[in-house]
Amino acid sequence: MSRKESNITRFAMPFAAHLEPQGASLALLYPVPSSTYSPPYASSPSESLNTQEAALSPLPQLKILHITSATHDMSKKNLNSYQRVHFFSRNAQLTILAKKGADFSVSAQEGTPIITAPLGGKLGLIIFSLFWLPTVGRKQKFDLVITEPSLVAIGGFWAKLTARMRWAVDIWDIPIRCHSESAIMKAKSWLTRKVFKFLYRFADLFIISILPNFELKEFDLPPEKMLTLKNAIWLEEISESAATERFEKVTIERKPFDILCMRSRYTADMGLDILAQAFLSLSEELEGICLTIVGIIPQEIRHQVADLEGMINVRLCGFVDHDRLLDTIRAASVCVIPFRDVADLSQTYPIKVLEYLALGKPVIASRIAGLSAMIEDGRTGLLFRPGDWQDLADKIRKLYHNHQLRAALSANALASRGEFDCVAKNRVILDRLYQITGWKNLNN
């Protein structure tokens, strides 16, 4: 099968320095149970990322089938789906079962087998997997199958039933999410979740990168099968040392006090109106203050920023590619996450927050569950009352006047970088996958 030439080796970074012994500083909410088990690595799995061509371990490797509806480009490199493909294709025998037209040339190790469905979309992938798994897939003798939190997880259940694989569900978002306000669509989502609540009873592991005590509770997942982690990112490309050259080339106009708010796409509950009210109250009071909002603002919520349009100290940027995003963060004085306290947002660990902290940016965020778990109030950032634009304005004003506090928050944020190293996180995940498949200690 022809594939685009992989350029991922340009991003094969020396991550081993970020890993502490036995994952001591990993972003775990619940520790991995101790055992005498040892994974069959030739060495630390991160060491294969230090070479131009990732060397295969001389020891047997786990055979993993990954069923996914994703497709990857460099803008997605900090997403869980990208990280799994990148890490497992270099530290296990990974095969990807994907939808028609999917591209993994920037994430998968060169030579990784990729089987694409002949029919398009998630439905095409599901139909194809129902035929492929009990025939060709079964003959491959995979140790386990990993599925995403979507309808394609049907393939995981089918692989467990027909091909006798272990099944891990990678939950980096709430399964079977419903974005529609339609009563019919909500009813459909409710029914589908009930079906998946039953199917998940057959899974062997749930890799959870959201808070488990919100919407996920309705699935009644067994705690002993849950590996609960926080989100994590690639650290090397946004380290202060590696960023120096790129930082010097930033062409964004420098302003005395830049406030940055960034998402790929906004929803009504992401609080742009709260940020707008806070900024408007400060714009005439604080000299040199300005605001940059990056991301797509749908027409139905455009009214939330209507009063900002046309202001000379406000930029509404729309979509910005990955490299420019990092440069935009570097140019900011403070980064703001004004989410409302709703379950959909409270249960997540936003990737952008990790990028802000890794670059040493002071963060002001609403005091909701996920953000509070990521930001230590007064140490790595400031938290404000959700929905309270006046409290947000007070926190911005505080950082505007208190340069010493801004410097302290920045230093503490940089010091916390090791807690969200995605290489360390994926090492923990792979170790657990070896455990559930019954691999023995090969070093004895």
Image (cartoon, rainbow, N blue to C red):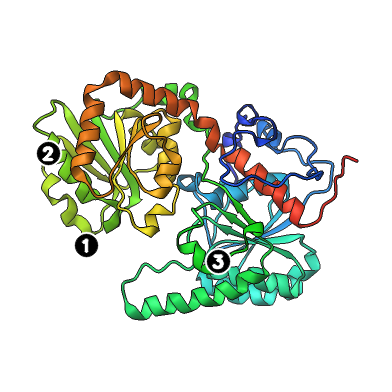
User: Which of the 4 image quadrants contains residue 354?
Assistant: top left
Quadrant assignment for the C terminus: top right
User: Going by the image, does 237 lie left or right of 433?
Assistant: left
Camera-nearest residue between 410 and 159 = 410
Q: Secondary structure at mark 3?
A: loop
In the image, 444: left or right of 162?
right
Foreground mark, 1 or 2? 2
* Residue 256 shows up from this direction: no
- Disc number at residue 100? 3
Secondary structure under the numbered disc 1 in the rendered image: helix
Q: Residues within 10 Å of mark 2 (few under 14, many from 20)?
A: some
140, above or below 232, in the image: below
Image disc number at residue 300: 1
Mark 1 or mark 3: which is in front?
Answer: 1
Toward the right, the furthest residue is 444
Residue at which label 2 appears = 281
Q: Nearer the viewer, residue 263 or 383?
A: 383
